[in-house]
Image (cartoon, coloured by chain):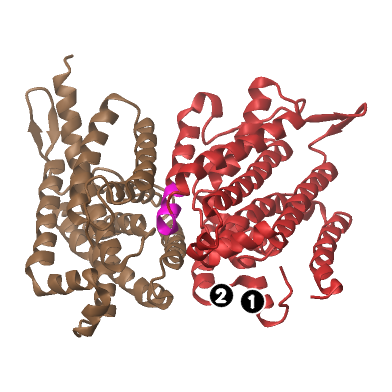
Chain colours: A red, B brown
Amino acid sequence: MTASASARPLLLHLAVIAVLFGLQFVLPDYDHSSFTRIMLLASYAVGFNILMGYTGLLSLGHAMFFAAGLYGAGLTMQYLGFGSPAAFAAGVASGFSLAIAVGLLALRTSGVAFMIVTLMFAQACFLATLYFNDITHGDEGFVLAAEARRLTLAGEVFELSAPDLRYNAALLLFAVCLLACLGLVRSGVGRVLIAIRENEDRATMLGYHTFRYKLLSLALSGTMAGASGAAYALLFSYVGATFASIQYSILPLLWVLLGGVGTTLGPLIGTLLMFYLVESSSGYTSSYMLVVGVALVLLILWFPKGILGTLREKWLPWLP
Amino acid sequence: MSFGPPLFLGLLEGTVTAFVLALTALGLSLVFGVMRIVNVAHGEFFMLGAVLAWAFSSLLLDAPALGFVLALVGSPVVVGAVAFAADRLVLRRLNYGPEATIVATIGLLYIIQQLVLMLYGPNARAVVPPIQFRVQFPWFGYSGYKLVVVAASAALLLVTWYTLMRTRIGLVMRATRFDRETAQAFAIPVDRVYSLIFALGAVLAAIAGVLIVPIQQAHYLMGLDPLLLSFIVVIVGGLGSLRGTLVAAFVIGLSDGVISTFYSGTLAKIMATLLVALVLVFRPAGLFGGANR
């Protein structure tokens, strides 16, 4: 591979981030806010894809990591008076610790059993958010106070509810996740993960301690989910049990499938398309989740590689 | 008030739960055992059965008993047809790959659930029990219909057992379950057996849905709980072991009845889900399942 060919993916990713940065000046208010959400959710999807796409582990309970971040940030801010940076750190830490704890147990299984174990753990977490209703306010959730969501930096006060700040904070998080994913995939560790996905027995035979690599992948994935959950709580000031429900475990699966399993940019494309598809259909009917169901069935039947996966296969073999 | 009567009530409620759960979980277990796939849409077949029961019985509002019989026949047939079609149109094309079928059945779950929401609406609706009598115990009266549910479920479990163990079609199903390729070599139409099993699993869930609807109203989101409970039962009982499934259904159903009489239902559910996850991690063959194929 020549130097220019190996620089191409990096340039592409930087260009995507630059385009996202530029978009904030041209997008109308409404889409401006939608894009903020999309970038946060896409960070979640990037994390999901590291596990599903590059390690071959399909989790059906990722919402628990997202919710860990959401509640980790929200509860510490609400009850312990944490400031925004500390609350964000608490959210990321909860996502990370939950991922390690779940990983130590769930990674003893594989395949279908792994899917069900993660589903069950996530359901237990969801039920726990309902059970501790006094603290979490269950389904209703709670709204974070505006005073707490200020950021004082070098004497200046920033409001986290300001649209521009929100957009760029989301972009920053997404850029970090995306570049981390790209770096991982191109590193030696990433190659081991792919080897595990392709043939775990052979990776073991080659001397790799596959359990550690899988745990690392799950931890990274859970941390990204936690980070996007924490950012979601802080930027949109709402914390509720919906984000822990099964639906939020299924959505990243759908986004990644649509964009392309095992492609670095697939999660962004999948999230973007699905977000607007669901939103436009929810204008017509209250049963907008129908779109999600139909999309899942159609994708798995006729388009299992997703958009970027197909592009890579047909025309762009250098796509990471 | 003494401890006895509430415990007795809890056990009665638990028995009803256990039998309905056994029917639902048996459907899931059959599908997993024979086809080696996890059907995430199983709970929606239960829900569809219940909702269709409401639809059928509202055709004959003057004669609730007759309407209920119509529902008991009609709605499993419709649900079975839906499942048969889903198997032919979707699952077979995926070659029953374990992960692909899970994704596809998640899709089916949302399709069925949201179509019901569209056509039936978000409200819960009640169906009048076909028989109205109360069994009078010394401490309290108890709905006679619930005892009928127990009897009907027990009869159906027996019929299913008989079909599997004593009839030719059951033999064919067991052969397919034991070794798919050899079965095919002996001219068993494995594809057709798969479709049939998938439909049969859905029919069992639908019947459970019909039976439950006079006790618990029909609602488009009612499928999630039976799905998770069936998962729990099938896993605790040992994946694919029918006897284990039945034993686990009774253990879970009875303890659920007793625990939720005395404690919070949510806590019981949290415990059960964690238990299942741990069983899968540490005893993948299930608590009651021995070596079986």
The answer to whether the residue labelled 1 contacts the one labelled 2, judged by CB atoms less than 8 Å apart, is yes
Q: Percent position (x, y) of residue A169?
A: 80, 44
Q: Which mark is residue A310?
A: 1
Residue B36: name its quadrant: bottom left
**Distance between the alpha carbons at the discs numbered 1 and 2:** 8 Å
Q: Which residues are magenta?
A: A110-119
> Is residue B271 a member of the stretch shown in magenta?
no
> Vertical placement of B119 versus B150: above or below?
below
The residue carrying pointer 1 sits among few (fewer than 14), some (14 to 19) or many (20 or more) residues within 10 Å by Cα, namely some
Q: Earlier in the sequence, mark 1 or mark 2?
A: 2
Give, as a three-letter code, the residue at label 1. Thr
Determine the secondary structure under disc 2.
Answer: loop
Q: Which residue is rendered at x = 27% and y = 78% of the image?
A: B181
**Residue drawn at (88%, 58%), measured in percent from left and top?**
A22
Residue in the picture at 63% in, 42% down = A226
Q: Is residue A115 magenta?
A: yes
| Residue A124: x %, y % from top left | 44, 39
| Residue B257 x/y as whole percent | 24, 34
Instruction: Return the mark for residue B35.
Output: none
Q: Which residue is at the front of the view, A142 or B257?
A: B257
Q: Do badges 1 and 2 share one subunit?
A: yes
- Prevalent SS, magenta region: helix
Rate crowding at label 2 as few (under 14), some (14 to 19) or many (20 or more) other CA atoms within 10 Å.
Answer: some
Q: Quadrant of residue B135?
A: top left
Q: Circle 2 is placed at which residue position?
A: A303
**Side of B27 where A172 appears, left or right:** right
